[in-house]
Image (tube, rainbow, N blue to C red):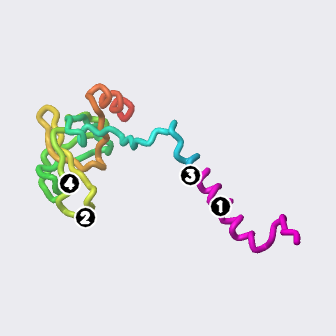
Amino acid sequence: MRKNAGFSLTDFPQTVFGVFIILSAIAFLAGCGLGTDRTLRLPETPILSGAQGWAVVTGAYARFKEKNDPASPDTATARRGEVFRVIGSERDPSGGDPTAMWYRLSEGSRSGWLRESDILFFKNREQALTASAGMK
């Protein structure tokens, strides 16, 4: 008696499963290319790295606060494009937005706290001054 050397329907599920495994392995190995950079690069923020940075006021007018609290008394005002040294930071104590930050800024006789949304950060004074020139 002769054995059937051809393909039967009972072999179909095993064949499909085998092809699926082989194609999955190829796709997995292709996705694990050695030439790709797998590091996560976050934008450098002087405040997060512990270094003092510089900030430029982005709003038409910003009111410096005595404390990092919107209800705190005003200590000074600043206009769009003015440059200040960042000397500290704290989270918003109101708890409304846990990611909101306040920054203590100072330049000359003016100092106080501004919200993160009112300023842009720069590594050094020269970068801040360049950005400031485009805002005025």
Please tell me whether mark 2 sits on a helix, a strand or a loop. loop
The residue indicated by pointer 4 is 91
Eye-nearest disc, 4 or 3 = 3
Q: Earlier in the sequence, mark 2 or mark 1?
A: 1
Crowding at mark 2 (Cα within 10 Å: few <14, some 14-19, many 20+): few
The disc at residue 20 is: 1
Please tell me whether mark 1 sits on a helix, a strand or a loop. helix
Instruction: Residue at 25%, 46% (x, y): give it.
Output: 62
Q: Where's residue 107, x and y in %?
A: 16, 33
Residue reaching furthest to the top:
126
Give 100 or 16, whichever is nearer the viewer: 16
Q: Is residue 45 above or below residue 3?
A: above
Kindly check if marks 4 and 2 are in contact, taking CB atoms under 8 A apart as contact: no
Quadrant for the C terminus in the image: top left
Instruction: Give the Cα separation between the discs numbered 1 and 4.
Output: 51 Å
Instruction: Give the Cα separation between the discs numbered 2 and 1.
Output: 51 Å
Crowding at mark 1 (Cα within 10 Å: few <14, some 14-19, many 20+): few
